[in-house]
Image: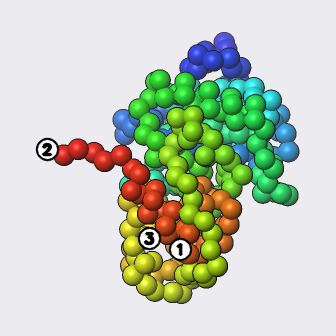
Amino acid sequence: MAGVCDTSIEANWREASNFEARRNELIPDLLIMHYTGMQSAQAALDILCRPESKVSCHYLVDEQGSITQMVAEKHRAWHAGRAHWAGENDINSCSIGIEIVNQGHILELQPFPDRQIEAVMALSLDIFKRHAILPRNVIGHSDIAPGRKKDPGEKFPWDTLYENGIGHFVEPEQIGDDPGFGIGDRHDDIAKAQRLLAQYGYLISDDGHFDENTDFVVRAFQRHFRPLKIDGRLDYSTLTTLMRLSKALPRIATS
């Protein structure tokens, strides 16, 4: 029997094989954006619904803006893999995943069509009606798994989503010509950046040593928040954008 879509906007239903109950009484408080990294929507849909693939996702949005739901939002889909955000390691149990059809970095990352992004935004806003998801928790696969993933990539229009009430974003600082810090460096500014990145949600230590993981995390941050240059260097532009982003976070009142 065909499933019933959670979303109130127009969508198709094709049930995936790989899903289960959410664990440890976790509920969705993250919305994760992915690209499919495949040549066609049909190929992506087949993989996401195939039992032996060991992957699945709640939604797929193709280039024309057509939406397919594969896993009910109450269930745990297998889209995040090994990942971490804001102290939580079982990301699949506390998230909803949206796969966006795009070949990704296989050849050259392509822009996302307007009608596809319009559908992603409509779907996201509809998901917010059912789940309490903070703006800072609308993130990319690369944010939660920076050592493994690059999606949805530097051409994903996070700024457009933010302008339409989805996610968190600030104007990036203009890129300068300073070399910044890289692997092997140690500095108080590195420790400061590491602390801010960890406070935002990334898995990173704040020892002031620019190690391989710091490189991965800085690249992930740049893909999301400073997309014009992805080099993993902690330059003035990256640090200033990070500080600006942290300052723009809503503050929780304490009594």
Mark 1 secondary-structure assignment: helix
Indicate the position of residue 183 as horizontal and vertical percent values. Answer: 57, 82
Q: Number of labelled discs?
A: 3
| Label 1 environment density (alpha carbons within 10 Å; few <14, some 14–19, many ≥20) | some
Along the horizontal axis of the image, is 112 left or right of 27? right
Mark 2 secondary-structure assignment: loop
Q: Which residue is mark 3?
A: 193
Q: Which mark is residue 236?
A: 1
- What amino acid does circle 1 point to? Tyr
- Give the mark nearest the N terminus, 1 or 3: 3
Front-lying residue, 158 or 101: 158
In the image, residue 94 above or below residue 65: below
Whether label 1 touches label 3, CB < 8 Å = no
**Residue that protrudes farthest toward the left in the picture:** 255
Front-lying residue, 219 or 71: 219
Indicate the position of residue 222 as horizontal and vertical percent values. Answer: 60, 62
Along the horizontal axis of the image, is 109 left or right of 93? right
Give me the residue at 46% from left, 24% from top: 130
Q: Which residue is mark 2?
A: 255
| Label 3 environment density (alpha carbons within 10 Å; few <14, some 14–19, many ≥20) | many
Residue 194 appears in the rendering: yes
- What amino acid does circle 3 point to? Ala
